[in-house]
Amino acid sequence: MLGGEVRGWSRWQRGQVLASCAVFVACLLVLHRLVPNGVGHLGSLLETFLPWLGLGIPALVVLSLLRRSVVALLAVLVPVTAWLGLFGGLLLPGTGSEYDLTAVAHNVSDENPDPAGTATTLMAVRPDLIGLAEVTPAALPAYRATLAPEYPHHTVHGTVGLWSRYPLTDARLVDIRPDGFGADWDRGLRATARTPWGDVAVYVAHLPSVRLGLPDGFGTVRRDQSAVLLGRALRAERSERVVLLGDLNSTVDDRGLEPVRAQLPSVGSGFAFSWPAALPVARIDQVMARAATITEIWSLPATGSDHLPIGARLRF
């Protein structure tokens, strides 16, 4: 009898380290904003890959079963609940099939060997708006020629461009240059699209890339500065309806994008990973909106770029 009690008690006692690991994962998920950015921008790094913390849950379950620990198995329910609370809704389909406008955002890559083929791929979903980043002078004629039959209205500033089914007015450069970048670094534009649902201010932006390495860790300083400038432009925007298309080199969970996210609350429900194209692990290409609901967001087939295009349905 005593031996049975000891064995029963042992099942509850063993696995405390696993239980602690489970609670730690849950804390990272729920309290990720408390992870400091002061050293190596660890907070932004964590938030960029936040959904992937869920991969630790199956491992904890297997280890708990091998350890025959009741405590560890019960503790695993904590990160499961936390992950589902944050990302469970992204597993559900879009909010409905009704939409007014389709938009596509794509970093086409300045090394793309087939710009015409890339444009054809984007046209397959019949978008109303197409925002492109890394449009080189050499590739621009191919994009113009391929898109012109269906998208007669377009504007290009620097390496970003917007093609539209609807007339574009008030097209201009948006200065989002961080410190130390020259005057020829043009990666932002704004235009008004005259749609059947009223005027829509459309922004196309390409924020600076980030790098992971020593001594800076997750190097987001310039991207974050650019996000602040873009956020200011969006805050000053007088149009009620605003759509942003672009490569923001940031996920919607990354605090570095907060100046933009605060102005454009609709980001779509879905993972829609876009980078890298060979094995996508994060959505750093975005379609975001104000005074509109993104009812669906998804990744398009691969092109000649190292990014996947992102498509979105919007309803005003």
Image: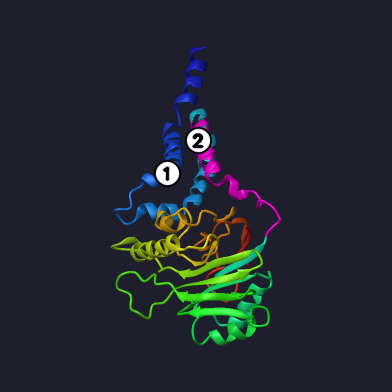
Q: Main secondary structure of the magenta part?
A: helix
What residue sits right under mark 1 in the picture? 28
Helix, strand or loop at mark 2 = helix
- Front-lying residue, 151 or 218: 151
Percent position (x, y) of residue 133? 50, 74
What type is the residue that disc 2 sits on? Val
| Image quadrant where one finds the C terminus | bottom right
Q: Where 182 falls versus 8 (above or below)?
A: below
What residue sits right under mark 2 in the picture? 78
Q: Where 74 falls versus 172 (above or below)?
A: above
- Front-lying residue, 93 or 268: 268
Percent position (x, y) of residue 275? 52, 65
Percent position (x, y) of residue 312? 61, 62
What type is the residue that disc 1 sits on? Leu
Residue 156 forms part of the magenta stretch: no
> Quick one: which residue is furthest to the top in this view?
1
Residue sitting at x 59%, y 46%: 89
The local crowd at label 1, few if under 14, some if 14 to 19, many if 20 or more residues have their Cα within 10 Å, is some
Asked where in the image residue 310 lies, by quadrant, the reply is bottom right
- Front-lying residue, 281 or 177: 177
Residue sitting at x 41%, y 68%: 209
Q: Which residues are magenta?
A: 72-99
Residue sitting at x 35%, y 66%: 222
Whole-Å distance between the Cαs marked 2 and 1?
Answer: 12 Å
The reply to whether discs 2 and 1 touch (Cβ–Cβ < 8 Å) is: no
Q: Where 250 falls versus 78 (above or below)?
A: below
The local crowd at label 2, few if under 14, some if 14 to 19, many if 20 or more residues have their Cα within 10 Å, is some
Q: Where 24 falls versus 239 (above or below)?
A: above
